[in-house]
Amino acid sequence: MSAPPRFGRVFPASHPRRININALFGLALVAALTACLVHPAVAQDKKGDTELRTIHGSAVDKDDNPVTSSVIYLFNVRTQAVITRIADDSGNYRFSGLDPNVDYEVHAEHDDMTSATRTISSFDSRRDVEIVLKLSHKKPAH
């Protein structure tokens, strides 16, 4: 005679209550791996969005009047890429979605005037940086 089953009743292979343990284990493994892969990706997207940097401000003349249509130059020190914006009717500009781990340099130009170059360091922990660019220097002649 054979020994009685150790884990409850044993059903024949054709019985509807028989469970394939390998299939159940495989399904559980797939579900666990999917949860592990999806969860960090979602968390990283949320984290990445909140940690991006914005640099904004205004371009003004020596008397603090807004200078409309000034060209604002943003220089990425790491890649040496330059992004430009045109100041609006109030002299305002904005650069959004910037990497906080990169140093940037920003300055404004309008006609024959330019502002001092301001540096935003990667060690500066502010995510929202406001810089007023005063157009008070003559552009160097080329």
Image (cartoon, rainbow, N blue to C red):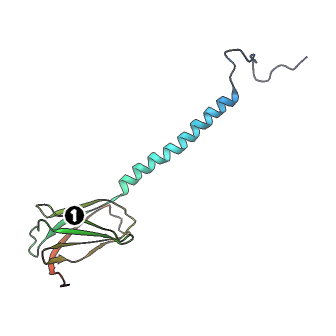
How many badges with numbers are in the image?
Answer: 1
Which of the 4 image quadrants contains residue 110? bottom left
Query: Where is residue 127 shown, x and y percent of the image?
Result: 32, 61
Residue at the far top in the pictured view: 15
Q: Is residue 67 left or right of residue 81?
A: left
Query: Which residue is labeled 1 in the image?
Result: 85
Q: Residues within 10 Å of mark 1 (few under 14, many from 20)?
A: some
- Where does residue 7 sit, x and y in percent of width and height? 76, 23
Residue in view at x 57 percent, y 36 percent: 31
Secondary-structure class at tag 1: strand
The image shows residue 120 at horizontal and vertical percentages of 31, 70
Image-quadrant location for residue 21: top right
91 or 141: nearer the viewer: 141
| Quadrant of the image containing the N terminus | top right
Q: Amino acid at mark 1?
A: Arg
Residue 45, image x and y in percent? 41, 49
| Quadrant into which the C terminus falls | bottom left
Displayed quadrant of residue 30: top right
